[in-house]
Image (cartoon, rainbow, N blue to C red):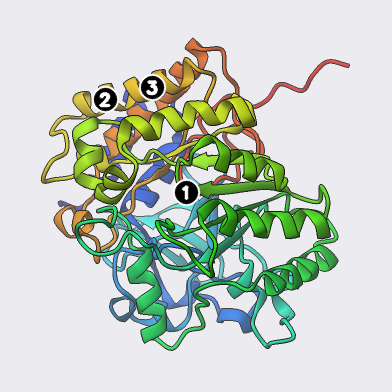
Amino acid sequence: MGSGSRTALVEDLMERFPHVPREAVFKEDLLRGGVAFDPSALSDNEGGEVKPKSYFIFSFDHGTLPELGEAALRRPPEEIILTGGPYDLRRTVVSVRVNPSSPYRVAANEDGVLGLYLDGKRISDVGVPPMPEYYRHTLASGKSVMEVAPTIQWGYLIYLTVFRVCQYFGAKEECQYCDINHNWRQHKAAGRPYTGVKDVEEVLEALEIIDRYDTAKASTAYTLTGGAITKTVAGRDEADFYGHYAKAIEERFPGRWIGKVVAQALPRDDVQRFKDYGVQIYHPNYEVWDEYLFKMYCPGKERYVGRDEWHKRILDSADIFGARNVIPNFVAGVEMAEPFGFTTVDEAIASTTEGLRFFMSHGITPRFTTWCPEPTTPLGKANPQGAPLEYHIRLLQAYRQTMEDFGLSSPPGYGPPGAGRAVFSVSSFMDSLPADEPTAV
């Protein structure tokens, strides 16, 4: 790429898609392609003033830990906030995905003020999350709160990955874009603490610490998640395994947080158990819409459940949770991944929009994570550049338009919508939706 070419591409897309907030254009580019960190911008891990990246489920990096250099020893921040600069950016929260060869770089200037640089030019100020008070306290076992119950989305969401591996294992079953199993292995290899199955009492103890020190009540929701369970873990099937944490949390802290569960699309009786345990929002992720791509890129899900049954179960779960509280995720960008993906942005957007229309016509609002091509995954290896930025920008446009077509508003449990207000950090869907109008009294 010639000098300045990235800037030219970004500015061209801003001009061509004026209805997509310019903040979202930068955010999607940082999420899809990663960002490099100058040593001046790294954290002092858990001993410092900056909240470090917790690796809460996937690596979300463009290199393995050994390839990240100093960023593997001194973690980068969990997230960054972009503001100001020549594009006059409104406050934008971006999940950190490290890529030492990215054209974007976070570095401090001579006054020690962090900024984001693109093609050598400072394009915004960078804010980093302060170390939360609750991260400074450990559990009785000596484990850190960051290891057991990290928070993301600028403190809004407690992310409880209670099962660190996935029982869809190996090339014939693992989702082809997912590095949950590799991320577990690399943390073990680096000697980092990374608990495989989290003890329910330890989870409660970590939440107790968060509840005690989060006096501003910034933490609003928790997500229970982890790998798919095709057999059992600790003698429990998937609904019971994830559900029993929810039950314990809701008994100990009734109504303190919005409870969410990310699990497979389960049969109706299992979904009912989640509801009975006190879960409020269910995320049965459908990953990718196209029938052939689902088969090729989610072979375990296809083999154990199948795409049509998966979709049927998503619709069924709306009867139990209410359509607004069923929010399946898809991985935006894998539609264009070689070897089987669409080769044009037009085809990819048409396919994804068909999926959005299918769910939204039933009142169900999917959400999405911007695909990070992690290098240890088959799709990451084959597509180190990810999907084109234009795909991501047009998806934001199509998403908002489809929501308007069906008269839907932003889903619950994600914080406020609107550029300058959103906290959801792993895609710009909330940044691109209209800010809630204050209701007239």
Q: Nearer the viewer, residue 208 or 77?
A: 208
Q: Nearer the viewer, residue 136 or 182?
A: 182
In the rendering, at what x and y percent does residue 438 appear? Answer: 77, 23
- Secondary structure found at label 3: helix
Quick check: marks 3 and 1 in contact, CB under 8 Å? Answer: no
Give the residue type at disc 3: Ala
- Left or right, 93 with respect to 141, comes to left
Quadrant hosting residue 142? bottom right
Disc sitting over residue 351 in the figure: 2
Task: Tell which circle, 2 or 1, labels the residue nearer the N-terminal end.
Answer: 2
* Distance (Cα) linking label 2 and label 3: 11 Å
Type of amino acid at the residue the image marks with label 2:
Ser
Q: Which residue is mark 3?
A: 398
Residue 286 visible? The answer is: yes
Left or right relative to 117: residue 338: left
Nearer-the-camera pick, 1 or 151: 151
Residue 429 rendering spot, x and y as whole percentages: 49, 35
- Viewport quadrant of the C terminus: top right
Q: Characterize the local packing of mark 2: few (<14), some (14-19) or many (20 or more) Cα atoms within 10 angstroms.
A: some
Q: Nearer the viewer, residue 163 or 218?
A: 163
Q: CA distance from mark 2 to mark 1?
A: 22 Å
Circle 2 or circle 1, nearest the eye: 2
Of pointers 2 and 3, the one earlier in the residue sequence: 2
Q: Which residue is mark 1?
A: 426
